[in-house]
Amino acid sequence: MKKLFIASTLSLMSISSFAATQGTLLLQGTIDQVLSLSVTPESGVNNSLDLTSTETDLKVAEVSEQTNSNTGYKILVRTANGGLLKNGSLDEVSYAMKYDGSDVTLAQSDTEVKSESTGGVYSYSSDVEISYTGQSAASLTQGTYSDTVTFTIQAN
C-alpha cells in the first residue's frame, strides 16, 4: 500500500511539472445598435398654417436623430401628397421644405435628405422648415389643407 501511495504521489508531482507558465483570458462585451428618430412639431405652428400669408423657412418641427451605427446612417423623407397641402380633392397649396438647412425634394417615395457615411455615435437635432406662397381666402376652397410627412432613419 505504501508503494502505491508513493507512486501516486510521484505521478501527481510529474503532471504538475508540465503545467503552463502563462494563460490567457478573453474578455468581451457586445453593444446593440441604437437607431432612433423622434419628430417634435413646433407647437401651434405645424397645425395652424396661415395659407393666406407667404412664409419663408418657417420652422414646423425638430427631428432628433440618435445612432451608434458602425456604418453611419441616413435620413429619408416622403410625403403622402408629394409636397402639396391638399383639401381633399377640392384644392391644393404647394410648399417647399428644408431639412437641417438643405432643400428637400418632396415626393411620395423616400428621398435621402441626410447621410453620415462614417460610423460613430451620433445624437443630433435637425430643424424642418417649410415655405409657401400665400393666397387670398377667396381663391381657395374652404376646408383643411394637409399633408403627412414621414421621416425614417436607417443604418448605411
Image (cartoon, rainbow, N blue to C red):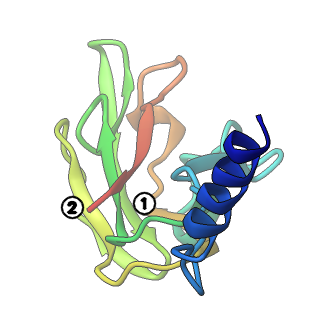
- Looking at the image, residue 134 sits to the left or right of residue 121; the answer is left
Tell me the amino acid under the disc marked 1.
Tyr
Tell me the amino acid under the disc marked 2.
Thr
Q: Using the image, determine if residue 83 lies above or below residue 99.
A: above
Q: Using the image, determine if residue 18 lies above or below residue 129.
A: below
Residues at marks 2 and 1, CA–CA distance in whole angstroms: 14 Å
The crowding category of the residue bearing disc 1, from other C-alpha atoms within 10 Å (few below 14, some 14 to 19, many at least 20), is some
Q: Which residue is mark 2?
A: 105
Q: Which residue is mark 1?
A: 132
Please tell me which residue is depicted at 42% across the width and 38% down the height of the picture.
Answer: 150
The crowding category of the residue bearing disc 2, from other C-alpha atoms within 10 Å (few below 14, some 14 to 19, many at least 20), is some
Q: Nearer the viewer, residue 3 or 34?
A: 3
Residue 118, horizontal then vertical, whole percent: 34, 84
Mark 2 or 1: in front is: 2
Task: Quadrant for the C terminus, please.
Answer: bottom left
Residue 61, horizontal then vertical, whole percent: 65, 56
Q: Under tag 2, what secondary structure?
A: loop
Dividing the picture into quadrants, the one containing residue 2 is top right
Please tell me which residue is depicted at 47% across the width and 82% down the height of the picture.
Answer: 101
Q: Nearer the viewer, residue 19 or 141?
A: 19
- Looking at the image, residue 74 sits to the left or right of residue 108; the answer is right
Residue 80, horizontal then vertical, whole percent: 31, 28
Q: Is residue 116 visible?
A: yes
Q: Nearer the viewer, residue 56 or 62?
A: 62
Q: Using the image, determine if residue 63 lies above or below residue 49.
A: below
Q: Is residue 27 visible?
A: no
Name which of mark 2 and mark 1 comes first in the sequence.
Answer: 2
